[in-house]
Amino acid sequence: MMDLQLLKTFLTVAAGLSFRKAAETLHYAPSTVTAQIKALEEDLGIPLFDRLGRRVLLTEHGQRLLHHARRMMDLEAETRRVLLDGEASVELAVRISESLGIHCLPWVLPRFRARSPATRLNLTTHSQHGLVRDLRHGVTDLALLLGEPFSAAGLRIEVLHRERLVVIVPPESPLAIRKTVHPADLEGVPLILTRHVWSVRRLIEQALSEAHVGIEGLVQCSSVEIVKRCVMAGQGVSVVPSFTVQEEVRQKRLALLDWAGEPLAAPVLLVRHEERSLSPAAAAFIDLLQAFFGACRASESST
Protein backbone atom coordinates (compact mmCIF):
# COMPACT_ATOMS: atom_id res chain seq x y z
CA MET A 1 0.00 0.00 0.00
CA MET A 2 1.31 3.45 -0.91
CA ASP A 3 2.23 5.76 1.96
CA LEU A 4 -0.20 8.69 1.99
CA GLN A 5 2.45 10.99 3.44
CA LEU A 6 4.69 10.25 0.46
CA LEU A 7 1.76 10.99 -1.87
CA LYS A 8 1.17 14.32 -0.10
CA THR A 9 4.82 15.23 -0.63
CA PHE A 10 4.56 14.15 -4.27
CA LEU A 11 1.50 16.38 -4.84
CA THR A 12 3.20 19.33 -3.17
CA VAL A 13 6.29 19.00 -5.37
CA ALA A 14 4.10 18.56 -8.46
CA ALA A 15 2.04 21.68 -7.63
CA GLY A 16 5.07 23.98 -7.78
CA LEU A 17 7.46 21.78 -9.75
CA SER A 18 10.04 22.54 -7.09
CA PHE A 19 11.57 20.45 -4.29
CA ARG A 20 12.62 23.63 -2.49
CA LYS A 21 9.12 25.18 -2.55
CA ALA A 22 7.63 21.87 -1.41
CA ALA A 23 10.02 21.79 1.55
CA GLU A 24 8.98 25.33 2.52
CA THR A 25 5.26 24.49 2.19
CA LEU A 26 5.52 21.28 4.21
CA HIS A 27 8.04 22.73 6.71
CA TYR A 28 10.50 19.94 5.87
CA ALA A 29 14.22 20.01 5.26
CA PRO A 30 14.91 19.82 1.50
CA SER A 31 16.70 16.51 2.07
CA THR A 32 13.51 15.07 3.59
CA VAL A 33 11.47 15.95 0.50
CA THR A 34 14.14 14.41 -1.74
CA ALA A 35 14.23 11.25 0.39
CA GLN A 36 10.45 10.88 0.39
CA ILE A 37 10.17 11.26 -3.38
CA LYS A 38 12.99 8.74 -3.84
CA ALA A 39 11.21 6.31 -1.50
CA LEU A 40 7.96 6.68 -3.47
CA GLU A 41 9.75 6.16 -6.78
CA GLU A 42 11.48 3.05 -5.41
CA ASP A 43 8.20 1.70 -4.07
CA LEU A 44 6.48 2.15 -7.44
CA GLY A 45 9.53 1.18 -9.46
CA ILE A 46 9.19 4.16 -11.80
CA PRO A 47 10.65 7.69 -12.03
CA LEU A 48 8.12 10.41 -11.20
CA PHE A 49 10.23 13.50 -11.88
CA ASP A 50 12.93 14.48 -14.33
CA ARG A 51 15.65 16.58 -12.67
CA LEU A 52 17.05 19.06 -15.19
CA GLY A 53 19.55 21.09 -13.18
CA ARG A 54 17.41 23.20 -10.86
CA ARG A 55 14.28 22.50 -12.89
CA VAL A 56 11.88 19.68 -12.07
CA LEU A 57 9.42 18.20 -14.56
CA LEU A 58 6.87 15.43 -14.17
CA THR A 59 7.58 12.28 -16.14
CA GLU A 60 4.77 10.57 -18.03
CA HIS A 61 4.35 8.21 -15.05
CA GLY A 62 4.25 11.20 -12.70
CA GLN A 63 1.50 12.83 -14.73
CA ARG A 64 -0.53 9.62 -14.59
CA LEU A 65 -0.13 9.43 -10.81
CA LEU A 66 -1.34 13.00 -10.18
CA HIS A 67 -5.08 12.45 -10.54
CA HIS A 68 -5.09 9.17 -8.61
CA ALA A 69 -2.94 10.60 -5.81
CA ARG A 70 -5.33 13.53 -5.40
CA ARG A 71 -8.30 11.15 -5.27
CA MET A 72 -6.57 9.06 -2.60
CA MET A 73 -5.88 12.14 -0.48
CA ASP A 74 -9.51 13.27 -0.84
CA LEU A 75 -10.70 9.81 0.15
CA GLU A 76 -8.41 9.79 3.17
CA ALA A 77 -9.78 13.15 4.33
CA GLU A 78 -13.37 12.01 3.79
CA THR A 79 -12.68 8.78 5.70
CA ARG A 80 -11.34 10.75 8.65
CA ARG A 81 -14.41 12.96 8.64
CA VAL A 82 -16.79 9.99 8.65
CA LEU A 83 -14.87 8.01 11.29
CA LEU A 84 -14.39 10.93 13.63
CA ASP A 85 -17.92 12.27 13.03
CA GLY A 86 -16.51 15.73 12.63
CA GLU A 87 -15.19 18.17 10.10
CA ALA A 88 -11.81 16.86 8.97
CA SER A 89 -9.62 19.31 7.14
CA VAL A 90 -10.00 19.06 3.36
CA GLU A 91 -8.28 21.09 0.68
CA LEU A 92 -9.64 23.13 -2.20
CA ALA A 93 -7.14 24.34 -4.82
CA VAL A 94 -8.24 27.41 -6.76
CA ARG A 95 -6.28 29.25 -9.43
CA ILE A 96 -7.49 32.83 -9.70
CA SER A 97 -6.52 35.96 -11.59
CA GLU A 98 -4.84 38.35 -9.15
CA SER A 99 -7.07 41.28 -10.08
CA LEU A 100 -10.22 39.13 -9.81
CA GLY A 101 -9.03 37.86 -6.44
CA ILE A 102 -8.64 41.40 -5.16
CA HIS A 103 -12.11 42.18 -6.53
CA CYS A 104 -14.19 39.27 -5.23
CA LEU A 105 -12.36 37.47 -2.40
CA PRO A 106 -13.06 40.05 0.34
CA TRP A 107 -16.76 39.24 -0.19
CA VAL A 108 -16.44 35.52 -0.95
CA LEU A 109 -13.97 34.41 1.75
CA PRO A 110 -15.93 35.18 4.96
CA ARG A 111 -19.02 33.50 3.50
CA PHE A 112 -16.98 30.51 2.37
CA ARG A 113 -15.46 30.13 5.85
CA ALA A 114 -18.94 30.18 7.35
CA ARG A 115 -20.14 27.44 5.00
CA SER A 116 -16.98 25.31 4.95
CA PRO A 117 -14.96 26.15 8.08
CA ALA A 118 -12.72 23.06 7.96
CA THR A 119 -11.55 23.54 4.39
CA ARG A 120 -7.97 24.55 3.71
CA LEU A 121 -8.20 26.90 0.73
CA ASN A 122 -5.13 27.00 -1.52
CA LEU A 123 -5.21 30.07 -3.79
CA THR A 124 -2.64 30.58 -6.55
CA THR A 125 -2.34 33.39 -9.06
CA HIS A 126 -0.34 31.58 -11.73
CA SER A 127 -0.96 32.40 -15.38
CA GLN A 128 -3.15 30.25 -17.61
CA HIS A 129 -0.04 28.27 -18.61
CA GLY A 130 -0.47 24.64 -17.57
CA LEU A 131 -4.04 25.19 -16.34
CA VAL A 132 -5.66 22.56 -18.59
CA ARG A 133 -3.13 19.96 -17.47
CA ASP A 134 -3.52 20.80 -13.78
CA LEU A 135 -7.33 20.65 -13.93
CA ARG A 136 -7.23 17.32 -15.74
CA HIS A 137 -4.83 15.84 -13.23
CA GLY A 138 -6.53 17.22 -10.12
CA VAL A 139 -3.73 19.56 -9.07
CA THR A 140 -6.23 22.43 -9.41
CA ASP A 141 -9.94 22.06 -8.58
CA LEU A 142 -11.28 25.35 -9.94
CA ALA A 143 -10.03 28.35 -11.88
CA LEU A 144 -11.40 31.89 -12.13
CA LEU A 145 -9.90 33.86 -15.00
CA LEU A 146 -10.33 36.98 -17.08
CA GLY A 147 -9.98 36.27 -20.76
CA GLU A 148 -11.45 34.96 -23.96
CA PRO A 149 -13.43 31.71 -23.59
CA PHE A 150 -11.58 28.66 -24.84
CA SER A 151 -12.36 24.99 -25.29
CA ALA A 152 -10.46 21.98 -24.01
CA ALA A 153 -11.53 18.35 -23.88
CA GLY A 154 -12.82 17.37 -20.45
CA LEU A 155 -13.18 20.92 -19.10
CA ARG A 156 -16.35 22.85 -18.35
CA ILE A 157 -16.09 26.61 -18.90
CA GLU A 158 -18.80 28.97 -17.65
CA VAL A 159 -18.93 32.71 -18.30
CA LEU A 160 -19.97 34.27 -14.98
CA HIS A 161 -19.86 37.90 -16.04
CA ARG A 162 -18.45 40.30 -18.62
CA GLU A 163 -16.34 42.99 -16.98
CA ARG A 164 -16.46 46.42 -18.57
CA LEU A 165 -13.12 47.60 -19.95
CA VAL A 166 -12.18 51.26 -19.83
CA VAL A 167 -9.37 53.48 -21.03
CA ILE A 168 -7.18 55.03 -18.34
CA VAL A 169 -4.95 58.10 -18.73
CA PRO A 170 -3.00 60.31 -16.32
CA PRO A 171 -5.10 63.11 -14.76
CA GLU A 172 -2.91 65.75 -16.45
CA SER A 173 -3.44 64.23 -19.90
CA PRO A 174 -5.42 66.37 -22.39
CA LEU A 175 -7.66 63.32 -22.79
CA ALA A 176 -8.63 63.38 -19.11
CA ILE A 177 -11.35 66.00 -19.65
CA ARG A 178 -13.20 63.73 -22.08
CA LYS A 179 -15.82 61.11 -21.24
CA THR A 180 -14.96 58.90 -24.18
CA VAL A 181 -11.90 58.15 -26.28
CA HIS A 182 -12.06 57.91 -30.06
CA PRO A 183 -9.41 55.99 -32.01
CA ALA A 184 -8.10 59.22 -33.50
CA ASP A 185 -7.40 60.51 -29.98
CA LEU A 186 -4.71 57.84 -29.55
CA GLU A 187 -2.59 58.88 -32.54
CA GLY A 188 1.03 58.46 -31.51
CA VAL A 189 0.20 57.61 -27.86
CA PRO A 190 2.04 54.58 -26.38
CA LEU A 191 -0.34 51.75 -25.46
CA ILE A 192 0.21 49.50 -22.40
CA LEU A 193 -1.90 46.33 -22.14
CA THR A 194 -2.27 43.41 -19.74
CA ARG A 195 -3.24 39.86 -20.64
CA HIS A 196 -6.78 40.60 -19.41
CA VAL A 197 -7.47 42.62 -22.55
CA TRP A 198 -5.56 40.55 -25.09
CA SER A 199 -8.88 39.00 -26.12
CA VAL A 200 -10.19 42.43 -27.21
CA ARG A 201 -6.90 43.65 -28.62
CA ARG A 202 -8.19 42.76 -32.09
CA LEU A 203 -11.11 45.20 -31.65
CA ILE A 204 -8.77 47.95 -30.49
CA GLU A 205 -6.30 47.44 -33.32
CA GLN A 206 -9.12 47.17 -35.86
CA ALA A 207 -10.61 50.47 -34.70
CA LEU A 208 -7.20 52.17 -34.87
CA SER A 209 -6.53 50.73 -38.31
CA GLU A 210 -9.89 51.85 -39.69
CA ALA A 211 -9.18 55.37 -38.37
CA HIS A 212 -5.69 55.20 -39.95
CA VAL A 213 -4.17 55.70 -36.52
CA GLY A 214 -0.69 54.42 -35.79
CA ILE A 215 0.49 53.20 -32.37
CA GLU A 216 3.77 54.73 -31.24
CA GLY A 217 4.64 51.79 -29.02
CA LEU A 218 3.00 48.75 -27.46
CA VAL A 219 3.96 47.26 -24.08
CA GLN A 220 2.42 44.00 -22.83
CA CYS A 221 2.76 42.68 -19.29
CA SER A 222 0.94 40.40 -16.87
CA SER A 223 0.48 42.82 -13.97
CA VAL A 224 -2.31 45.40 -13.90
CA GLU A 225 -0.51 47.13 -11.01
CA ILE A 226 2.53 47.75 -13.21
CA VAL A 227 0.25 49.06 -15.95
CA LYS A 228 -1.46 51.50 -13.59
CA ARG A 229 1.89 52.80 -12.28
CA CYS A 230 3.20 53.32 -15.80
CA VAL A 231 0.07 55.22 -16.85
CA MET A 232 0.21 57.38 -13.71
CA ALA A 233 3.83 58.17 -14.58
CA GLY A 234 2.73 59.44 -18.00
CA GLN A 235 4.22 56.56 -19.98
CA GLY A 236 1.11 55.88 -22.06
CA VAL A 237 -2.56 54.87 -21.85
CA SER A 238 -4.14 51.50 -21.16
CA VAL A 239 -7.35 49.50 -21.36
CA VAL A 240 -8.21 47.69 -18.09
CA PRO A 241 -11.24 46.21 -16.27
CA SER A 242 -13.03 49.11 -14.61
CA PHE A 243 -13.04 47.50 -11.15
CA THR A 244 -9.22 47.52 -11.06
CA VAL A 245 -8.96 51.33 -11.06
CA GLN A 246 -11.89 52.53 -8.95
CA GLU A 247 -9.71 53.60 -6.02
CA GLU A 248 -7.16 55.42 -8.21
CA VAL A 249 -9.96 57.23 -10.05
CA ARG A 250 -11.59 58.22 -6.74
CA GLN A 251 -8.24 59.60 -5.56
CA LYS A 252 -7.82 61.38 -8.91
CA ARG A 253 -4.58 59.56 -9.62
CA LEU A 254 -6.06 58.25 -12.88
CA ALA A 255 -8.79 59.40 -15.24
CA LEU A 256 -11.27 56.87 -16.63
CA LEU A 257 -12.82 57.11 -20.09
CA ASP A 258 -15.13 54.87 -22.09
CA TRP A 259 -14.14 53.53 -25.50
CA ALA A 260 -16.17 55.37 -28.13
CA GLY A 261 -16.27 52.44 -30.52
CA GLU A 262 -17.65 48.96 -30.00
CA PRO A 263 -18.05 48.32 -26.24
CA LEU A 264 -15.15 46.41 -24.76
CA ALA A 265 -15.51 43.69 -22.13
CA ALA A 266 -13.46 40.84 -20.68
CA PRO A 267 -15.33 37.64 -19.78
CA VAL A 268 -14.96 36.20 -16.27
CA LEU A 269 -14.47 32.45 -16.72
CA LEU A 270 -15.10 29.69 -14.19
CA VAL A 271 -13.22 26.56 -15.29
CA ARG A 272 -13.36 23.04 -13.83
CA HIS A 273 -13.14 19.41 -14.87
CA GLU A 274 -16.55 18.39 -16.19
CA GLU A 275 -16.32 14.74 -15.12
CA ARG A 276 -14.88 15.16 -11.64
CA SER A 277 -17.52 15.25 -8.94
CA LEU A 278 -17.63 18.45 -6.93
CA SER A 279 -16.73 18.30 -3.26
CA PRO A 280 -19.07 20.19 -0.90
CA ALA A 281 -16.34 22.84 -0.51
CA ALA A 282 -15.96 23.29 -4.28
CA ALA A 283 -19.73 23.49 -4.73
CA ALA A 284 -19.94 26.15 -1.99
CA PHE A 285 -17.12 28.19 -3.53
CA ILE A 286 -18.75 28.07 -6.98
CA ASP A 287 -22.12 29.07 -5.52
CA LEU A 288 -20.56 32.12 -3.86
CA LEU A 289 -18.73 33.16 -7.04
CA GLN A 290 -21.98 32.91 -8.99
CA ALA A 291 -23.74 34.99 -6.35
CA PHE A 292 -21.03 37.67 -6.35
CA PHE A 293 -20.92 38.13 -10.11
CA GLY A 294 -24.69 37.82 -10.35
CA ALA A 295 -24.89 40.81 -8.01
CA CYS A 296 -22.37 42.63 -10.24
CA ARG A 297 -24.62 42.07 -13.25
CA ALA A 298 -27.69 43.24 -11.36
CA SER A 299 -25.88 46.37 -10.16
CA GLU A 300 -24.71 47.27 -13.66
CA SER A 301 -28.16 46.73 -15.18
CA SER A 302 -29.73 49.05 -12.60
CA THR A 303 -27.36 51.95 -13.35
Image (cartoon, rainbow, N blue to C red):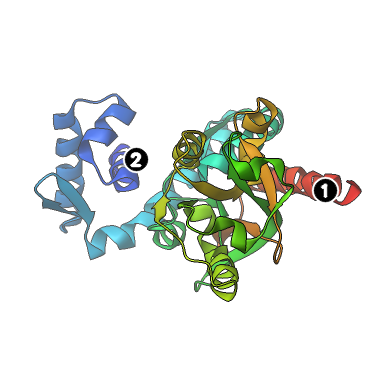
The residue sitting at 70% across, 65% down in the picture is 261
Q: From the image, tell me which residue sits under label 2.
A: 8
Left/right of residue 213 with respect to residue 33 in the rendered view: right
Residue 270's place in the image compared with 244, above or below, is below
How many marks overall?
A: 2
Left/right of residue 292 with respect to residue 199 in the rendered view: right
Q: Determine contact: label 2, label 1, CB under 8 Å.
A: no
Q: Residue furthest front?
A: 174
Label ID, residue 138? none
Q: Crowdedness of circle 1 by 10 Å Cα count: few (<14), some, many (20+)?
A: few
Left/right of residue 219 with respect to residue 201 in the rendered view: left
Left/right of residue 129 with respect to residue 186 in the rendered view: left
Q: Residue furthest left?
A: 53
The residue lying toward the viewer, choosing from 145 and 256, is: 256
The quarter of the picture where residue 82 lies is: top right
Residue 34's place in the image compared with 58, above or below, is above
Q: From the image, tell me which residue sits under label 1.
A: 300
Q: Secondary structure at mark 2?
A: helix
The quarter of the picture where residue 101 lies is: top right
Q: Position of residue 83 (x, y in %)?
A: 56, 34
Task: Identify residue type, mark 1.
Answer: Glu
Task: Identify residue type, mark 2.
Answer: Lys
The residue sitting at 42% across, 58% down in the picture is 216
Q: Residue furthest right?
A: 302
The residue lying toward the viewer, choosing from 46 and 54, is: 54
Q: Secondary structure at mark 1?
A: helix
> Is residue 27 in sight in this rendering?
yes
Q: CA distance from mark 2 to mark 1?
A: 44 Å
